[in-house]
Image (spheres, rainbow, N blue to C red):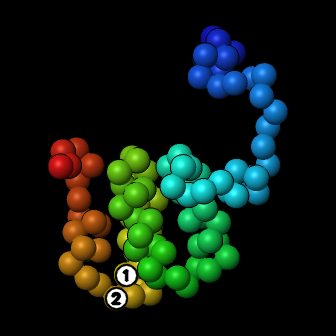
Amino acid sequence: MSWGLYAWVGAPDLPSQPLAARLSVDPAKAPIEELIARAEAHLSNNPGDGHGWDVLAPVYFRVGRYADSINAYSQAGKLLGDSSPRLTGLGEDPATPRM
């Protein structure tokens, strides 16, 4: 069953691309997963970038990565201090519809 899903969703006849090649694509044309991967790579090399954590936190929330969102909001708060958007992000309920 998984092979059928892979064949339907993926493209098994295409060669794989190394991460570096995928990250060289214009960000405006990249899928959200690649943009997140870029941000994560940046933050792994620059964990003190509070602005980076601040930008990534709501993105994690929107894609359903709630634990990662909490971590990112917490990191931003540690580095930049508390703010209304950060505290609101930490307190949001994933079951609440977003506009």
Instruction: Using a 10 Å C-alpha cutoff, classify the residue at mark 2 as few (fewer than 14 neighbours), some (14 to 19) or many (20 or more).
Output: few
State if disc 1 and disc 2 touch (CB < 8 Å).
yes
Residue 47 vertical placement versus 3 (above, below):
below
* Left-right relation of 14 to 23: right
**Residue nearer the viewer, 44 or 33:** 33
**Mark carried by residue 37:** none
Q: How many marks?
A: 2
Residue beneath label 2, please? 81
Q: Residue at x 23, y 59 (%)?
A: 92
x then y, percent, for residue 73: 38, 71
* Left-right relation of 60 to 82: right
x then y, percent, for residue 9: 59, 22
Q: Residue at x 46, y 59 (%)?
A: 68
Q: Quadrant of residue 60?
A: bottom left
Residue 57 vertical placement versus 96 (above, below):
below
Residue beneath label 1, please? 77
